Image (spheres, rainbow, N blue to C red):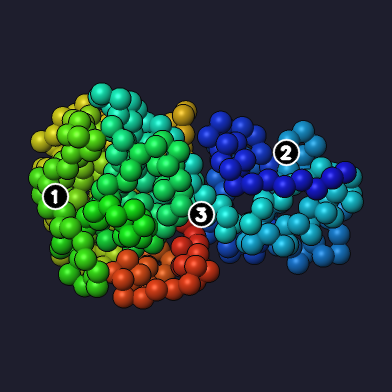
């Protein structure tokens, strides 16, 4: 039997195509419980690698013979060892190249829609972290919204489309992942926009992203219109694209709503959150397609791998949009919140430009699940 390699891209294809996969995760039980590779048709077995040092014979009955077997660990080494042991025991097995580190960082671009006059809208899905970024393309120009720190992914994709990146936006000062926005701007000469109410402590130059700011992409073809929508942060800003799509940042998700506590001001911001969700968004067309900055669970992915849903459907189905009693709403979004993102305070400092960790340190900061939602 042979030991094969599985890249993050191959795993992502199985997730999006809704294919079967059996994952033997050899990380410690607490790491596995906190965060794992998710797929709707995936099956799992978690056995820490140190429990398998004397052999894998005891777990062979738990390993299927009719599915691809993927061994996963934090960085790769342990999974190679266990995959080799399975191979020696007569089982085909693969290991994940780069381990959970590579899974956390991988981005797959998926086309959401064609826009008017030849424009295109792409969603960059970071399956291992639940992050969603966007690129709008029109007439040789591109704008990026909520870019992750994988700068090369965005610049290479723009190059493959033969377009120049001219504008970059962050919907808010992120706390769960490191933004690549200003770094892409520095590389491409694009204008970098940030809401000024979130930028009071930043130490770099930026263009202020204000309510009703409108930017045209590709010789005035495609319109990106800003809508001030505070609540997740005091500066949170949404975007209406081409009068068809509503990019909600971390204010509204498909299955939940944004949490208001990542700057330690939940009691102050919960009122803003309700005002945005129950007043500002209610004034918009139900036909707008919501495109959030994160997803929480794998079931939020559509058949094509995108995360998107009609605003009117969310008003009907999303529990966070249907809490009539204001006191109950306040309690739900301020009490018993899930754990805060790993290293979120340090990530905010990075996104303010106050600290500059190494690439490895940034990877460690981001490891773990997305926790931007109330639930």
Tell me the residue that label 2 is attached to. Answer: 68
Relative to 303, residue 322 above or below: below
Q: Earlier in the sequence, mark 3 or mark 2?
A: 2
Mark 2 and mark 3 in contact (Cβ < 8 Å)? Answer: no
Residue 228 circle label = 1
Residue 105 circle label = 3
Q: Is 1 or 165 nearer to us in this picture?
A: 165
Q: CA distance from mark 3 to mark 2?
A: 23 Å
Element at badge 2? loop
Q: CA distance from mark 1 to mark 3?
A: 29 Å
Q: Residues within 10 Å of mark 1 (few under 14, many from 20)?
A: many
Q: Give the image location of residue 60, x and y in percent.
A: 83, 48
Q: Is 371 or 3 nearer to us in this picture?
A: 3
1 or 2: mark nearer the eye: 1
Element at badge 3? helix
Query: On the image, which quarter does residue 306 sit in?
Result: top left
Relative to 81, residue 264 above or below: below
Q: CA distance from mark 1 to mark 2?
A: 47 Å
Q: Determine if residue 57 is in view.
A: yes
């Amino acid at each position: 039997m042979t030991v094969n390699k599985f890249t993050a891209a191959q795993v992502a294809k199985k997730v999006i195509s809704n294919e079967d996969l059996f994952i033997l995760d050899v990380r410690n039980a607490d790491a596995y419980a906190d965060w794992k590779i998710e797929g709707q048709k995936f099956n799992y077995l978690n056995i820490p690698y140190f429990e398998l040092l004397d052999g894998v014979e005891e777990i062979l009955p738990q390993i299927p013979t009719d599915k691809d077997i993927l061994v996963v660990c934090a960085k790769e080494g342990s999974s190679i060892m266990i995959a080799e042991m399975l191979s020696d025991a007569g089982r085909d097995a693969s290991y994940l190249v780069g381990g959970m580190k590579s899974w956390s960082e991988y981005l797959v671009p998926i086309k959401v829609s064609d826009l008017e006059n030849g424009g295109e809208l792409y969603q960059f899905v970071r399956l291992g972290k639940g992050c969603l970024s966007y690129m709008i393309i029109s007439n040789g120009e591109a704008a990026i919204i909520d870019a992750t720190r994988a700068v090369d992914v965005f610049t290479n994709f723009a190059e493959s489309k033969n377009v120049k990146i001219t504008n970059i936006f962050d919907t808010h000062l992120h706390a769960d992942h490191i933004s690549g926005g200003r770094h892409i701007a520095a590389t491409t000469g694009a204008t970098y926009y940030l809401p000024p109410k979130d930028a009071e402590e930043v130490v770099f130059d930026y263009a202020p992203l204000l309510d009703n700011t409108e930017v045209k992409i590709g010789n005035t073809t495609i319109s990106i219109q800003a809508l001030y929508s505070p609540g997740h942060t005091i500066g949170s800003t949404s975007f209406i694209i081409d009068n068809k799509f509503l990019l909600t940042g971390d204010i509204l998700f498909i299955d939940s709503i944004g949490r208001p506590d990542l700057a330690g001001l939940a009691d102050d911001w919960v009122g803003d959150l309700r005002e945005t969700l129950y007043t500002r968004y209610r004034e918009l067309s139900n036909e707008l397609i919501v495109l959030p900055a994160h997803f929480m669970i794998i079931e939020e992915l559509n058949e094509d791998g995108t995360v998107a849903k009609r605003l009117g459907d969310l008003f009907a189905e999303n529990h966070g949009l249907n809490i009539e009693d204001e006191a109950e709403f306040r309690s739900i979004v301020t009490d018993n919140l899930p754990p805060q993102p790993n290293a979120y305070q340090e990530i905010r400092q990075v996104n303010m430009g106050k600290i500059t960790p190494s690439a490895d340190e940034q990877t460690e900061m981001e490891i773990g699940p997305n926790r931007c939602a109330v639930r």
